[in-house]
Every structure is written in C-alpha cells, then in structure tokens.
C-alpha cells in the first residue's frame, strides 16, 4: 500500500495529474469541434498531437515553476513537505516540459504562439512579480484576481487553443468557454477554502477570507447553477443531449465532492477528487462521440 501511496503522491504533487486534466479538457473541446472522439476510428482527431503535448507540458511547466519556487514552513501540508524534499524533481520537470513545449510550437500555427505568449505571461505573473507596473506583487497575492485569473487561463487553454488550432471561429464556441470558466470557479474556490488559514497568515486575501466561509459556499452553489443554466442555453442553440446531461451530471458531482471536502481536507483528496472532476467532465463529452452510447446526439 505504501508503494501505491508514494506513486500517487508523485503523480499528484509533480502536477502530472494536473497536466492530464488540462489534456482531457482540450481533447473534449476537439471532440466538440470535430464531432468525433480520439477513441474512434473515424475523424481526424488523434490520440496524441503536438497540441496535446503542448498543453500537457505547459501545465506541468507552470505548476512546477510555482511549487519549485514556493517556500513554506515544514508541516504546513503534505504537498509542501514533498516539494521541499523533491525540489530537484520540480527543476527537472521545468526543464523537460520547457523543451517539449518549444519543440511542439514548431508544429502549431502562429495564432497558438501568440495566444500562448499572452497566457504564459499571465501564468508567470501569477507566481512571479514580473509585471513592471505592480511593484513586488504577484497576481496570486490579489485574492479575487487570483481566482478569476485561474479560471480564465484554464478556460482559454482548454477551449480557445484547440479552437484556434483547428481554424474555427471563437465566437461560435463562446458558451463552451463560459461553461469551462464556470466549471473552474467552484473547484478553485474549494482550494481557497482549504487554504484560508495559510493565506490569512500570509496576508493573501482570497475570496473566502474576504466574504467569509458561508458566502464562499453560497458562491459555489451559484456557480453550479450557472453551469446548468449555460448548459440549457447551449442545448437551445445546439440540441445535443449528451452535452446537456454531462453539464448537469458534473454540477451534481461537484456538489457532492465539495461537500465531502469539508471532512477530507488533505492535499490528495483535493488534487485527486476535486481536480479529477475535469477528467470526468472531459470523458462525459468524449465517450458519447465514440458512438457507443445511443442516447448521445450530434450537432453543430
């Protein structure tokens, strides 16, 4: 059991799992764009492509950069202790993922490069004080901005990048972007709730610390209602049953998982269960595209 526990820690704390979450959502967007699945024999969507590797590697790059430079006292969290013990792992993953990302850019179009440059600057500014007009401040030090930034970057990476790569109009997939943004909102708030004490000690005024715990949970519930509302709006525009069912199912699942996060506050629960929602959502979109589910419809 200890061996499997250590393997799980490596997957979660090295941010490989976060990379898989970003990859899954990206592939889900591609499935919607092309109306096919990477697991089906038809269509032009491959299991592995330069875009897939680019998204996967960049997610690992940004998160390992964040945790590689993050300094926390011993005993604050299991992940912090793991990072302090395996600092070299973070550095090696930063190097390998940076090389992989650069190589993949050769095969991606120019719009991807420009979009990634913009998103990369935002992501770096999250962990490093690189913006000249904000003295000695990282974007994560601004609580509400931190939340909006995380949701925005994840939504952009997993919807806009594949849309640009496949030459589609962004305006035609605006609801999907809003759905991804709304999907990330309760997940990010759940992590901020878990870190309330540490953030308060470091004078990082995250949303839960500003509006209070009760209101933070109310905002999570409101986000879930927004997800369902957007899914209904999307269904009116494009009547695809499995997209509506997927959004409603994932909203209910998030409600259950966040309820149990009040009891289970460990890093492993949050990273595996709460972040894992993204992979489940991706599979709920992708799998019906295989044609194995007769209740799934198609549409534009």
Image: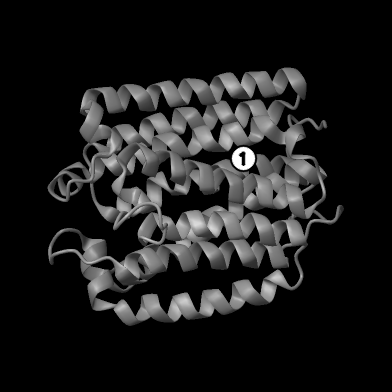
Quarter occupied by residue 258: top left
Q: Is residue 229 above or below residue 279?
A: above
Residue at 30%, 32% in the rendered image? 259
- Give the percent coordinates (x, y) of residue 37: 75, 50
Residue at 17%, 46% in the rendered image? 203
Q: Is residue 217 above or below residue 289?
A: above
Nearer-the-camera pick, 282 or 165:
165
- Give the percent coordinates (x, y) of residue 281: 56, 41
Q: Is residue 103 above or below residue 135?
A: below
- Give the percent coordinates (x, y) of residue 197: 15, 44
Quarter occupied by residue 138: bottom left
Residue at 78%, 30% in the rendered image? 297
Quadrant, the N terminus: bottom left
Q: Regarding mark 1 in the picture, which secondary structure is present there? A: helix
Within-10-Å neighbours for mark 1: few <14, some 14–19, many 20+: some
Visible residue check, residue 150: yes
Q: Is residue 65 left or right of residue 154?
A: left
Quarter occupied by residue 264: top left
Q: Is residue 100 left or right of residue 288?
A: left
Q: Which residue is mark 1?
A: 284
């Amino acid at each position: 059991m200890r061996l499997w526990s250590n393997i799980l820690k490596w997957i979660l704390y090295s941010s490989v799992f976060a990379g898989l979450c970003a990859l899954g959502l990206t592939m889900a967007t591609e499935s919607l764009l092309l109306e096919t699945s990477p697991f089906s024999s038809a269509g032009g969507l491959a299991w592995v492509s330069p875009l897939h590797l680019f998204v996967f590697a960049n997610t690992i790059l940004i998160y390992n950069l964040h945790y590689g430079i993050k300094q926390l006292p011993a005993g604050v969290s299991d992940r912090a202790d793991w990072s302090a013990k395996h600092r070299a792992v973070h550095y090696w993953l930063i190097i390998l993922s940076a090389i992989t990302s650069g190589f993949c850019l050769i095969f991606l179009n120019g719009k991807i490069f420009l979009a990634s440059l913009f998103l990369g600057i935002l992501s770096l500014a999250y962990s490093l004080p690189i913006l000249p007009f904000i003295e000695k401040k990282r974007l994560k030090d601004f609580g509400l901005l931190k939340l909006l930034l995380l949701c925005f970057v994840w939504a952009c990476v997993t919807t806009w990048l594949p849309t640009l790569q496949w030459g589609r109009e962004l305006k035609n997939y605006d609801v999907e972007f809003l759905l991804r943004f709304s999907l990330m909102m309760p997940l990010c708030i759940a992590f901020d709730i878990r870190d309330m004490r540490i953030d308060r000690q470091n004078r990082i005024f995250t949303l839960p610390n500003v509006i209070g715990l009760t209101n933070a949970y109310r905002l999570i519930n409101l986000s879930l209602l927004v997800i369902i509302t957007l899914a209904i709006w999307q269904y009116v525009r494009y009547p695809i049953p499995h997209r509506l069912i997927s959004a409603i199912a994932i909203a209910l699942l998030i409600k259950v998982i966040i309820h149990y996060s009040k009891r289970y506050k460990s890093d492993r629960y949050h990273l595996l269960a709460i972040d894992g929602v993204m992979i489940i959502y991706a599979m709920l979109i992708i799998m019906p595209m295989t044609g194995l589910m007769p209740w799934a419809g198609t549409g534009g």
